[in-house]
Image (cartoon, grey):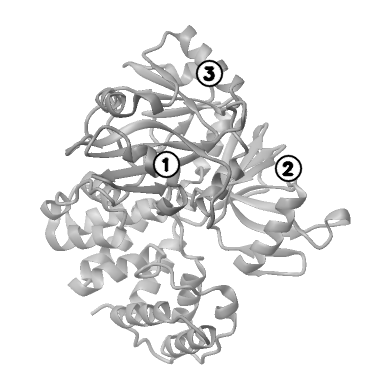
């Protein structure tokens, strides 16, 4: 039987080293010791997640809990999972007080180190998206299966604990049982940035070039008349996007899974601001803005899964079922035609283009070079680490943002700069209120927040700097917008930031 103290010790060991190999070894060592019933909840804890998902506990509730720590470790993994489940089930009148009481009971059974771990767990401080990749490698090492098999099962299931159970209890044959299931979203394939169009087009093989829209990623599943729509973070938004549901229900097929973007257009056919598209995802009532889909991939069609087929085959399937809704682009264009597409995309109010290898399979969650995005300005998706109280006309508002890049080896985000530029009055008011809900600490000058919020930053470039831990600093950084459609696991890595020094 594994205790929570064992998880806390390994978590501390992982946080204390920068070596990916050492992190993987420490995690795999604990995974090998788990009993069958412990695999799923322990994997969640090791990845910095609450077993079973969010529990509706905020920092205001956590700050109200007072419990003397236990003298000796006694909490088992099963007991922790059960207690978290109890907190999750609390609802209705007086739920705040009852959550506080349940948390107090849990924390009173925990040692001081375990209390610190649990508070950070509930507060989201342990949830580092980059750690998922290290845990995937640890699952492979502990179970003796190929990391590619674990990665694929995670792509298809979207659930790390379920993937760990399959690998550790059933091996590669159990992992092979995961398949694309209609109505269960899979993790999306991602594009890595390229400095220039020529760089993205370089290399052997044929390419497609498509518009990069200033929209929101969607994944659509249809099974007969049943249609479901998901965001890039796998959140279902079906009831909020009725026009997309009706459109997909009208396609000439029995079943389909489509990957694409959606956005609201103005009367001239140009994209509306990104925030208006995102507002539709959370709308509880009918909105005037209609969403238009632009699909760029087909992952399943009429009973046939296409994930492992080359992109050229998936595009043929897409053309056969949704030709009128395909994203603008061209297959194997000449350099001149590719440049014209890039110019046309910008002229239409879009962000640029995406260059894709026509021989590539669909590899979810990877930022390799099979898909390369090209934009005219430098942008990075970074996480917010903290914000400073403003001065002058910004007095009373949280203004100057501390920005971090993702550590690809599963460590905490690495600070690469600050900025207060580009923040509108509306954004200042929003982040001042939101950050105080997400606060994890601070002082009279600064509020620290859990590193969950992704913000898109425009910059002139980066430069070497000893001022920040990553030894690089952003030049003339400006806030473009927050990205509620992305989570911290999709933020750009410190390597991507450093790559801008080399013009990669």
Image location of residue 359, percent across then percent down: 27, 23
Q: Which residue is mark 3?
A: 342
Distance from Cα at disc 1 to Cα at disc 3: 27 Å
First in sequence: mark 2 vs mark 3: 3
Which residue is depicted at the point 23% across and 55% down? 141
Query: Relative to 180, is 488 on the left or the right?
Result: right
Residue 427 visible (yes or no)? yes
Question: Quick one: SS at disc 1?
Answer: helix
At label 3, counting other C-alpha atoms closer than 10 Å, the crowd grade (few under 14, some 14-19, many 20 or more) is many
Considering only vertical position in the picture, is 291 above or below 431? above
Tag 2 near tag 3, CB within 8 Å = no
Which of pointers 1 and 2 indicates the residue nearer the eye? 1
At label 1, counting other C-alpha atoms closer than 10 Å, the crowd grade (few under 14, some 14-19, many 20 or more) is many
Q: Which residue is mark 2?
A: 422
Which residue is depicted at the point 72% across and 63% down? 446
* The quarter of the displayed image where residue 114 is located: bottom left
* The quarter of the displayed image where residue 458 is located: top right
Image location of residue 5, percent across then percent down: 37, 78
Image location of residue 68, percent across then percent down: 51, 92
Q: Which residue is mark 1?
A: 244
């Amino acid at each position: 039987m594994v205790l929570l103290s064992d998880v806390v010790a390994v978590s501390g060991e992982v946080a204390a080293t920068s070596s990916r190999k050492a992190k993987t070894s420490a995690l795999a060592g604990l995974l090998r010791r788990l009993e069958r019933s412990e695999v799923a909840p322990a994997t969640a804890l090791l990845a910095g997640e609450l077993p079973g998902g969010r529990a509706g506990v905020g920092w205001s509730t956590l700050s109200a809990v007072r419990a003397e720590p236990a003298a000796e470790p006694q909490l088992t993994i099963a007991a922790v999972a059960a207690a978290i489940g109890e907190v999750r089930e609390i609802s209705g009148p007086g739920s705040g007080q009852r959550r506080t009481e349940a948390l107090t009971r849990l924390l009173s059974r925990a040692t001081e180190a375990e209390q610190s771990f649990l508070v950070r767990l509930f507060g989201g401080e342990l949830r580092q998206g980059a750690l998922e990749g290290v845990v995937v490698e640890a699952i492979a090492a502990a179970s003796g299966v190929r990391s590619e098999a674990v990665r694929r099962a995670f792509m298809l299931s979207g659930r790390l604990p379920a993937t760990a159970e399959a690998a550790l209890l059933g091996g590669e044959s159990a992992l092979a049982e995961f398949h694309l299931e209609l109505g269960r979203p899979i993790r999306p394939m991602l594009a890595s940035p390229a400095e220039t169009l020529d760089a993205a087009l370089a290399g052997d093989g044929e390419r497609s070039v498509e518009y990069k829209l200033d929209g929101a990623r969607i994944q659509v599943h249809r099974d007969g008349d049943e249609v479901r729509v998901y965001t890039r973070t796998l959140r279902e938004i079906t009831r909020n996007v009725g026009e997309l549901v009706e459109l997909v229900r009208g396609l000439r097929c029995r079943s389909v899974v489509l990957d694409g973007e959606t956005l609201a257009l103005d009367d001239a056919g140009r994209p509306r601001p990104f925030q208006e598209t995102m507002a539709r995802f959370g709308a509880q009532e009918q909105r005037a803005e209609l969403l238009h889909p632009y699909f760029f991939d087909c992952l399943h069609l009429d009973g046939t899964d296409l994930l492992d087929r080359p992109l050229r085959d998936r595009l043929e399937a897409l053309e056969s079922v949704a030709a009128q809704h395909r994203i603008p682009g061209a297959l194997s264009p000449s350099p001149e035609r590719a440049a014209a597409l890039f110019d046309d995309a910008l002229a239409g109010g879009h962000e640029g283009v995406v260059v894709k290898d026509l021989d590539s399979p669909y590899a979810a969650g990877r930022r390799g070079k099979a898909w390369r995005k090209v934009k005219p300005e430098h942008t990075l998706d970074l996480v917010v680490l903290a914000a400073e109280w403003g001065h002058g006309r910004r007095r009373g508002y949280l203004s100057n943002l501390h920005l971090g890049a993702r550590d690809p080896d599963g460590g905490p985000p690495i600070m690469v700069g600050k900025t207060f530029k580009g923040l509108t009055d509306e954004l200042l008011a929003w982040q001042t209120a939101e950050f105080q809900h997400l606060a994890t600490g601070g002082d009279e000058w600064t509020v620290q927040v859990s590193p969950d919020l992704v913000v898109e930053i425009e910059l002139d470039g980066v430069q070497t700097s000893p001022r920040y831990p990553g030894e690089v600093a952003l030049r003339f950084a400006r806030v473009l917008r927050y990205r509620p459609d992305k989570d911290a696991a999709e933020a750009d890595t410190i390597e991507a930031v450093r790559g801008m020094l080399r013009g990669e």
